[in-house]
Amino acid sequence: MKTNVGGIDRILRILLGLAMIAWALSGGPLWAWLGVVPLATGLFKFCALYTLIGVNTCPVKNPG
């Protein structure tokens, strides 16, 4: 898997995922468990949807 999630995008995904999971744990709706998805994509730095639509938020690395 090539990473395609980076920087602020990654931080926002992790924070959103944690917030949604906390909401689910505190009695929120069942769909709040979907917070696992942004949390996982932030932690693994890979989003399958980004691959499908050709988006990459990782900074370009210069060789050498």
Image (tube, grey):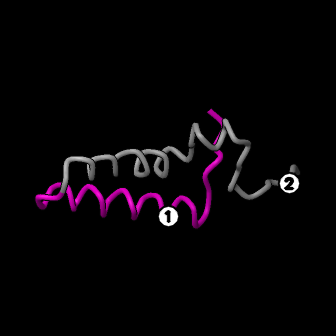
Q: How far across and down, in percent of the image, does residue 25 sit?
A: 15, 56
Depth-wise, is mark 2 or mark 1 nearer the camera? 1
Residue for badge 1 = 11
The local crowd at label 2, few if under 14, some if 14 to 19, many if 20 or more residues have their Cα within 10 Å, is: few
Q: Which of 43 and 63 lies nearest the eye of the viewer?
A: 43
Residue type at tag 2 = Asn
Q: Is residue 22 magenta?
A: yes
Q: Residue 36: which disc?
A: none
Which of the 4 quarters of the picture holds residue 58?
Answer: bottom right
| 29 with respect to 17 (left or right) | left
Magenta region? 1-28
Residue for badge 2 = 62
The local crowd at label 1, few if under 14, some if 14 to 19, many if 20 or more residues have their Cα within 10 Å, is: some
Q: Secondary structure at mark 2?
A: loop
Of mark 2 and mark 1, the one earlier in the sequence is 1
Q: Is residue 9 magenta?
A: yes
